Amino acid sequence: MQYIEKPVHPFNRILDHVPILGDVIRQPLGAIGFIIVLAFIICVIFAPLIAPYDYSRQDIPNRLAGPSAQYWLGTDHIGRDIFSRLVYGSRIAFGTALPSVAIALTIGTLLGLIAGYLGNKVDNIIVVLMDSLQAFPSIMLSLAILALLGPSLVNVIIVIGLTWMPNYARVIRAQTLSIREKTYIESERSIGATDGSILLSHILPNVIAPALLLAAMDLPWVITFEAGLSFLGMGVRPPTPSWGVILSDGYAHIFESQWPIIWSGVTLALTTLGFTLFGEALRDVLDPRVSGTRGL
Amino acid sequence: MKRKFWLLISLFLVASMIMSACGGLASVAPTATPAPPKILKARLSKDISNLDTANVTGKEEDTVDRAVMEGLFRYDITGKLVPQLAETYKVSDDGLTIDFTLRKGVKWQKGYGELTTDDVKFSFERFLVTDPKPAYADDWASLDHVEIVDQYTGKLIFKKPQATLWTVVLPMTSGLIVSKKFYTEAGPDKIKTEIVGTGPYIFDSWTPKQQIVLKRNPDYWGIQPSFDEIDLIPMDDDKAAEVALQAGELDFSSISLTSVDKFQADNKFKVDLIPSTAYSWIGMNVESPKLQDVNVRQAIRYSIDVPSILKAAYNNKAPRANALIPEGTLGYWKDAPVYDRDVAKAKDYLSKAGVTSLELTMTYENTDEYSTWAQIVQQNLAETGIKVTLNPLDSSSFWAYGADGKDKELELFAVGYSSVGPEPAWSTMWFTCDQVDLWNWMRWCNKDFDALHVKGIETIDSGVREQIYIQMQKLWDESVNSIMVTNVPQVYVTKQGFKSVIYPGGLSPMLREFKGE
Amino acid sequence: MLVYVVKRFFMTILVLLLVITFLSLLVHIVPGDPASAILGPRATPALIQKVRSAMDLDKPFYYQVGNMVLNLLHGSLGTDIITGQPISRFVFSVLPHTLILAITSLSLAVLIGIPMGVFSATHPDSWMDHLMAIISISFTTIPSYVAGLFLLLIFAVQLHTLPAMGLGKAGDTIDYIRHLILPSIALAITWIGYLARLVRTSLLEVLNEPYVRTSRSEGLSEGLIRYKYALKNALIPTIAVLGVGLGSLMGGAVFIEIIFSRPGMGLLIYNAIQIRNYPMVRSGVLIVSFLFILTNFIADLIYTFLDPRIQLNKGQS
């Protein structure tokens, strides 16, 4: 017996081989997101190859020039190529976002597991601590800490990690609470498994998925948050080209040239858009009911 | 339920509208009078924090104080020293006594009675209090006491001559006369944010972070001022002020040098570029192990491209400075050497010092201006083979180097000081040996320099003084403790139809002489 | 009900205490000196010492916490060292402007976002739905400071059509509202997009529920079903979010207030941080945190008031 194969577009056939990603790309918005994220990652990896100039190379006689064949997007106030700075800036965005989300995820998961599993007093204490951390307006908390610690990339990462951490603790705690009472956990306990091994081998694998998805959805927020801090002069040190720094340099020269603001603003908006589209498509595919609603 | 929802939404909206209305109305009395009052809207670059003349925190307070209060003398619109509240005066031959007669019948604002010699005595002797010493105590350091002859005549008696008296004390903020009655009644906190003077404008109200309102003083003894009201709006950010000027929301503001072209091209505005007494430089901590060797410092001096800094940070609108004392101030050193960038020479000096690799930290306040400086310096020094790490700090962390000897940690730094008036001693005073650990961040200590500084203050003859200050700058130059960069001019934009006047030194506007149509 | 309110009240106090403690600790962990920044370059050591002790910087942190709590019990936020004025004078001078900004932005978000969401949900998979999806997602992802700078660039710098800086002429309500337009739009954009998405999702969910299908089969008109039954249920999660929204908009206002030089809590705290005016920072953050917790609480109450099915203790998790 023979099957009559329906004609399938070759691209779709490739997609069949990459299970989750394929489903994401099949959605039009997911595809747009994927392209933007891909472009971003290519910039991160191949920045020196893509950027025509070094990000700190100065050409002062040509400062604040508009787009031209020599400088595709124009130059900033010290005559540096904006395009090159934006390309290298992706590394800062990524290099801040990833570790800070990782910190938030790790500490948050740990606290969430402990709170959810042990319950009672420990749970109450952790919940109140998380509540008070969240009662701070996150931008002001970060500004206050950074003003005291001094601006630097590492401090920004720590601060973002700390302010984002309670969200993860909450999600993990709620999940742990619901799993803790399941019968199979009870039976593990009755055969003498230690708390540690139950947490690590039974609870963690079951609760981590929503937290990971949350982390993926958080990346764009963290990127804009870092850029915002840099915009206020609280982020990375010059001449490191954070997008927020390019934006604030542009603002300082708004009457001379508007290109730096336009390009860095558009880059920031596009990147977050791409990550969000991609993240939402991913969520739709995996469909664990988590909503990425923070950072607003 | 839907109705409940929309009810909530409309409540929201109504509440917000009511609050808008209140927010708008709360601050100031309505202004609907038959003839519209003449109002000047000017920007202050910071909100006021201490208006007390002996402790003012900055030029903003200075601006407000001098619109409301008056001294025995003042600078007129041409920058000449003229008597103000003093009707007549006479300086003794040794310069140690000043006899004065006050103008009669001058009334304090807000009903604080008539101006008398008692107020003068109170105003100046306040600076001699020791617990705690007021911030501007140095201004009256040589004052012994004020003698009251009668209600209108008195004598200022000095312990020793003080040249700064006539340039920056008597005609400026420290020379303003305050009402003894008001000061005693108000107490130490109230005088920080309220003032009573004899001047053309009355300090009417202060809404923190929003505005300061000055009103015409109808009982002013002199010529009535031009405006019924002056609204001073604190705006920290130059760009914000520039946008507000363009939108017609301000009549007068200082702006940044980089926006000069934009405003000059617009005939709605008049732009004044005023040379100022501010001076900014790149300093080197001569005590730092890495910078001890004068050859290393020479290498740095020859590496830095000052014209590039002037182009990128100021759009070429700021003049290059080659020595400490600015042009226009007594003691300006016209023939100071100019050091052009010469990488080969710099490398020679570096090898002469026997240094093969050098890593330095450059500390600066994280404004657009200094951040531009620092990034250019970083590139310049990289070509000589010196690696520079940048250390931008917000203003508090940066200025905290001026206490407790924290400046020991500095290596390279960019900084600017300003003196409120054209007085050379106000520039040299920060670089004496006893200022090490405070404001002498180069930590450069030279006994001859110190001796000349003291001599300069006590010398009255301006020809001799000039030579003293030039000599001091030579010592400074030989020591290679810094690279002078610029005397940043102040830029003021005035809307068509208004006329502005700036005090000598360029740092504060002379509000009392502003005119409008 | 009463038990719940009392419990929440004590939780709020506990959280606020922790906030104060944390802020005081922060000051003590890292040495930074406010004095020279506050007094200017002419500060003498004696004056600096005076400022330090006035700020309790020379005392242990629990002393500061105790002092602050004591002040609060007397209904005071303490005194500003720099100006000698009560801190409350600063707070109450700027707080209304931040509240107005946040409330206006939230109202804009409701007025624009909800109709967008309803339209999308009632025309699922139409091209307009896709267009709305792109618009609303783009809106949610634009950082408020980028939106603010772009609005500033277009309407204030290029076109000169709208005033941007400050609050406008004192006493002139029309002028005040004109000055509110750009900042509130900049702040609202994220929330417009977010509400549109939220309403679309929850409305679609409700429209697919059995009871809606039943009423459809009973021949009730589509409009009646959509707007009378479905929408009201779909809007309940929105209400819960609005409370969070108001709180977070107040915090997020800091960028907007800086860009538009608009007096408000964000700018007040930001400036105080810059000059290390610790008592001011502490009081400012405390007030904003308090309002944040309060709006959340009120949103919870409204939530239960709108939907009696929800058990009150649910809010505990």
Image (cartoon, coloured by chain):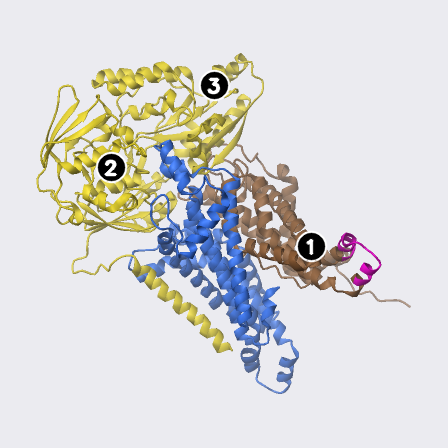
Chain colours: A brown, B yellow, C blue
Residue position marked by numbered label 1 in the rendering: A114
Tell me which chain the residue with mark 1 is part of.
A
Q: Is residue B120 magenta?
A: no
What is the x, y in percent for residue A276? Answer: 61, 56
Residue A197 shown in magenta = yes
- The answer to whether A55 appears left or right of C263 in the picture is right
Q: Amino acid at mark 1?
A: Ile
**Whether labels 3 and 1 share one chain:** no
Question: Is the stretch drawn in magenta largely helix, strand or loop?
Answer: helix
Residue A252 can be seen in this image: yes
Type of amino acid under label 3: Arg
Task: Answer with mark 3 or mark 2, whichever residue precedes in sequence.
Answer: 3
**For mark 2, does the 10 Å Cα neighbourhood hold few (<14), some (14 to 19), or many (20 or more) residues?**
many
| Outermost residue, bottom side | C218
Question: Of the residues tagged 2 and 1, which is closer to the observer?
Answer: 1
Q: Residue furthest top?
A: B352
Q: From the image, tell me which residue sits under label 3.
A: B297
Q: Position of residue B266 (x, y in %)?
A: 30, 44
The reply to whether callout 3 and callout 1 are in contact (CB within 8 Å) is: no
Instruction: Report helix, strand or loop for mark 2.
Output: loop
Q: Secondary structure at mark 3?
A: helix
In which image quadrant can residue B356 be found? top right
